[in-house]
Image (tube, rainbow, N blue to C red):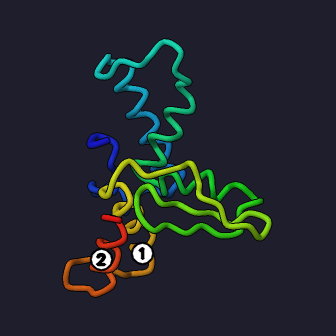
Amino acid sequence: MEKLDLYQRSLVDNYSDAELREEASRMARQIIRAGEIQLPEDADQALLLKETVAESIGLGLLEPLLEDESVTEIMVNGPDKVYIERFGQLQKSTACFTGNASLISVIERIVAPLGRRIDEGSPWWMHVCRMARG
């Protein structure tokens, strides 16, 4: 994840979303080919690459939920407290963030294009931190 977090690099300003995703996919494939990580033989490499890219530069576990047309609302109350509304019914999702850092990273990616920053001086930030801790 450290090698793929392109938002920590200057590339972000020069790449479109599609280019960022392609670069992250390329880097992930390169890491796998170089043997830097060992995958189980039965691992779905395409799914792993998609999830890794979503986690490192996208919206993580929110991406498949956003693509699901039956999901009308997504509510996140913490890394493992993700709720969705589907057909007017609220249900707890089986999806969960890998931890607080993952959740906060996604929140930062959501607010960055809006020109907003999240920092400890912001009351909203403190609310997000409390939610992330559960």
Report if the CB atoms under discs 2 and 1 are less than 8 Å apart.
yes
> Within 10 angstroms of label 1, few (less than 14), some, or many (20 or more) residues?
few
| Residue that appears at 49% across and 57% down | 59
| Amino acid type indicated by mark 2 | Ile
- Horizontally, is 15 left or right of 63 in the view? left
Question: How far separated are the C-alphas under marks 2 and 1?
Answer: 8 Å
* Residue that appears at 49% across and 34% down: 49
In the image, is residue 25 above or below residue 63? above
Q: Secondary structure at mark 2?
A: loop
Q: Which residue is at a point 27% across and 79% down the rendered structure image?
A: 126
Query: 111 or 41: nearer the eye?
Result: 41
The quadrant where residue 87 appears: bottom right
Badge count = 2
- Secondary structure under tag 1 reads helix
Q: Nearer the viewer, residue 69 or 83?
A: 83
Q: Which residue position is annotated with label 1?
A: 111
